[in-house]
Image (cartoon, rainbow, N blue to C red):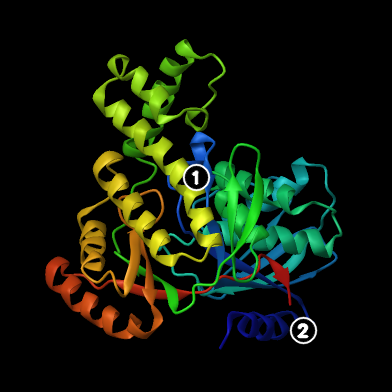
């Protein structure tokens, strides 16, 4: 049964009234990794893995929330919201975001459920926050824009879940369009829709089932390397604000002033920003082969230069590269150290290829990978 039917039925059974139903999609990122915090470009898309919410105001100050997937019910009031360590934190954070903006909302009854694979890098937490925020905005006619809601959702993750995420995930969940990706400029938060016809090809995600430690020192070290490069570049040109403002030639001029590791990390980011813009152009022209090649380039840059890949991701990409007639491109998706490898693959080959990869992966790593075929869909909306 689809999540929207599950939550509607459960809501009626629990609260004896008919709810408003909201769908909030997860997201993938086609290309543009570690560019967001360098004011670069990313290319996310909302996908057909999503949370469904059934919501109705209850005339009180109390929020009564039931998670079908966790089979767990929690109630809380707007005053005295305190972050804990469970799923309800995200929703409390959203409520607190409305409150701190001085926007009037009141208590609701809510049932939610989803089919976004947990830990697969499809931003289930962003979908959860965006969907609930959108529901409150609709029910109480709060008047927040989609960009406002993205900031509310991001703040909820920062302050109530302890995750210092960028805004790409929330932006994609709220601004997604059917059959389109977003070319998002992280410097000014403007976007362009890229309507994509993949033809005979589809997006297949293969989950390594390796859990990354994104909050660990490795992620912070890479951000620090980028900031170190920018500080040196500012000595040459004070107008430089981020690696977005820098060409490879300019970086080369200060190579002697930079540790080798910092130079290589900055070179990857500058190249990836340019590669993402190039990817937008080849997608507009319908050149899937060229786009696939850019995916491979990104992966090996992430692996060899930025050093955020892992043995399992490299294995999957190397395997894909042996079948380039069917698998046009593959790369690690997300911050790194595990998660999913995104593939651009001929639809007719998905079943056979998945079976072959599963057997080799299990034999090599003694763990079962996950397989998810996704399509692009519209952002958060009411049914």
Say left or right for 239 vs 259: right
Q: Which residue is located at x 24 percent, y 64 percent? A: 321
- Label 2: which residue? 16
**Residue at disc 2, secondary structure:** loop
Q: Quadrant of the C terminus?
A: bottom right
The image quarter containing residue 288 is bottom left
Query: Farthest residue in the top direction?
Result: 235
Q: How many numbered marks appear? A: 2
Res. 195 visible in picture: yes
In the displayed structure, 72 sits above or below 95; it is below
Residue 211, x across and y down, in percent: 32, 56
> Front-most of 76 and 135?
135
Residue 259: horizontal and vertical position, in percent?
27, 21
**Pointer 1 local density, CA inside 10 Å: few below 14, some 14–19, many at least 20:** some
**Is residue 217 depicted above or below 231 in this figure?**
below
Residue drawn at point x = 12 percent, y = 73 percent: 363
Can see residue 332?
Answer: no
Which is nearer the eye, 159 or 259?
A: 259
Query: Residue 177, located in which quarter of the rendered image?
Result: bottom right
375 is higher (above) or lower (below) than 103: below
User: In the orientation shown, which residue stands out farthest toward the left?
Assistant: 363
Residue 269 appears in which quarter of the rendering? top left
Q: Residue 163 shows which numbered tag?
A: 1
Q: Is residue 93 found left or right of 333 in the rendered image?
A: right
Q: CA distance from mark 1 to mark 2?
A: 36 Å
Q: Nearer the viewer, mark 1 or mark 2?
A: 1
Residue 194 locus on image (x, y percent): 60, 60
Q: Nearer the viewer, residue 264 or 134?
A: 264
- Left/right of residue 183 with respect to residue 38 in the rendered view: right
Please identify the quadrant where the N terminus is shown. Answer: bottom right
User: Where is 254 relative to 281, above or below?
Assistant: above
């Amino acid at each position: 049964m689809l999540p929207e039917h599950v939550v509607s039925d459960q809501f009626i059974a629990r609260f004896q009234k008919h709810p408003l139903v909201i769908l909030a999609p997860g997201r993938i990122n086609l290309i543009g990794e570690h560019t967001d915090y360098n004011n670069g470009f990313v290319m996310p898309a909302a996908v057909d893995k999503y949370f469904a919410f059934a919501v109705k105001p209850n005339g009180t100050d109390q929020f009564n929330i039931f998670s079908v997937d966790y089979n767990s019910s929690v109630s809380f009031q707007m005053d005295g919201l305190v972050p804990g360590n469970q799923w309800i934190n995200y929703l409390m954070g959203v409520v607190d975001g409305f409150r701190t903006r001085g926007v009037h909302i009141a208590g609701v009854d809510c049932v939610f459920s989803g089919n976004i694979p947990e830990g697969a890098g499809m931003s289930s937490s962003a979908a959860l926050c965006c969907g609930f925020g959108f529901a409150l905005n609709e029910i109480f006619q709060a008047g927040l824009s989609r960009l406002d809601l993205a900031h509310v959702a991001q703040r909820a993750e920062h302050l109530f879940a302890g995750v210092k995420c960028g805004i790409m995930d929330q932006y994609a969940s709220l601004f997604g369009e059917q059959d389109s990706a977003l070319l998002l400029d992280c410097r000014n938060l403007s976007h362009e829709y890229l309507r994509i016809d993949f033809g005979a090809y589809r997006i297949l995600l293969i989950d390594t089932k390796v859990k990354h430690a994104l909050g660990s020192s490795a992620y912070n070290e890479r951000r620090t390397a980028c900031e170190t490069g920018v500080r040196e570049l500012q000595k040459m040109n004070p107008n430089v604000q981020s690696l977005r403002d820098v060409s490879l030639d300019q970086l080369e001029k200060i190579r002697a002033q930079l540790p080798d590791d910092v130079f290589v990390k900055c070179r990857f980011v500058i190249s990836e920003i340019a590669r993402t813009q190039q990817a937008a152009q080849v997608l507009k022209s319908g050149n899937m082969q060229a786009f696939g090649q850019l995916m491979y380039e990104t992966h090996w840059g992430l692996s060899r230069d930025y050093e955020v890949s892992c043995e399992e991701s490299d294995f999957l990409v190397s395997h894909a590269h042996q079948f380039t007639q069917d698998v046009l491109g593959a790369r690690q998706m997300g911050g790194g150290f595990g998660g999913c490898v995104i593939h651009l693959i001929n639809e007719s080959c998905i079943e056979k290829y998945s079976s072959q990869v599963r057997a080799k992966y299990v034999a090599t790593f003694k763990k079962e990978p996950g397989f998810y075929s996704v399509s692009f869909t519209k952002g958060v909306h009411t049914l």
